[in-house]
Amino acid sequence: MKFGIMGAMPDEVDQLCARLTDVTKESYAGVEYHCGTLQGKQVVVCCAGMGKANAAATVQVLCTKFGIDTLIFSGIAGNMTSKIGIGDVCVGETVVYHDAELSMIAQSAPFTTEYHGDPALVKAALDACGACGVKAIAGKIATGDTFVGDAATKKSIEEKCHPDCVEMEGAAVSQIAARNGVPCVILRAMSDNADESGYEVLVVKQFSIAEYIKTATEIVAHMIESL
């Protein structure tokens, strides 16, 4: 089995890449793919870039060119729930777009308005969080091409789809994985609360997210070992 592991920013995959053995690198369509071994399993790790278009294009390359059998997306998100806090993890049991005309998107494969994490992968992710001592929920992730960094936008998204967290890639990753018949799960460590303070920290100041990514890296490594 070959695992694809994606992030949207270099920080989200650098720590995983550093753990690979027998590594080869290949650049294709603007993305560098790191092929190697992690926990004894064959993996392809890459940084797709931010946003839905980058995510979708990269998933298709992973499926078509690299022949992955399973896909894990690991990164950070803005928290939208009181069930978890900063540094905790939301595993994507359900993933939706918050900025799309869903009825129109559902007219093409995989013909659905929402996407669901593969049950075995969701369980493996939750088990890995438990093993790593990380609080986690199986929840709902909302995706859109706008960074959510103000209370008004946050409230609008809450009213529209009631997610547990918000980010910029998960639904696109899930949609294209489903189109290719590849089991997929989205993991998100909470880095901020999707409000003005989050925008200030992550966008204006370009704050290092390494402390949050360390959590996700440990979880993904544990997942790969167990699957």
Image (tube, grey):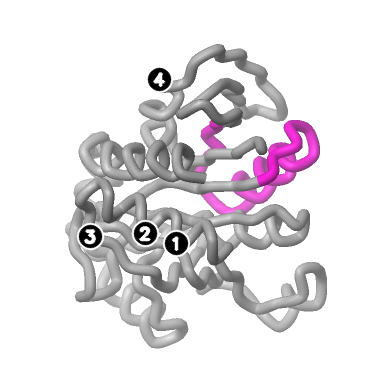
Residue that extends furthest to the bottom in the rendered view of this protein: 159
Q: CA distance from mark 2 to mark 4?
A: 24 Å
Which residue is labeled 2 in the image?
Answer: 126
Q: What residue type is disc 4 on?
A: Ala
Q: Residue at x 27, y 49 (%)?
A: 131
Q: CA distance from mark 2 to mark 3?
A: 9 Å
Q: What residue type is disc 3 on?
A: Lys
Q: Position of residue 226 (x, y in %)?
A: 45, 44
State the mark number for residue 18: 4
Q: Quadrant of residue 213?
A: top left
Which residue is labeled 1 in the image?
Answer: 123
Assign a secondary structure to mark 4.
Answer: helix
If you read the primary sequence from the N terminus, does the residue marked by circle 1 or circle 3 appear first?
1
If you read the primary sequence from the N terminus, does the residue marked by circle 2 or circle 4 appear first?
4
If you read the primary sequence from the N terminus, does the residue marked by circle 4 or circle 3 appear first?
4
Q: CA distance from mark 4 to mark 3?
A: 25 Å
Q: CA distance from mark 1 to mark 3?
A: 14 Å
Disc 2, disc 1: CB below 8 Å? yes
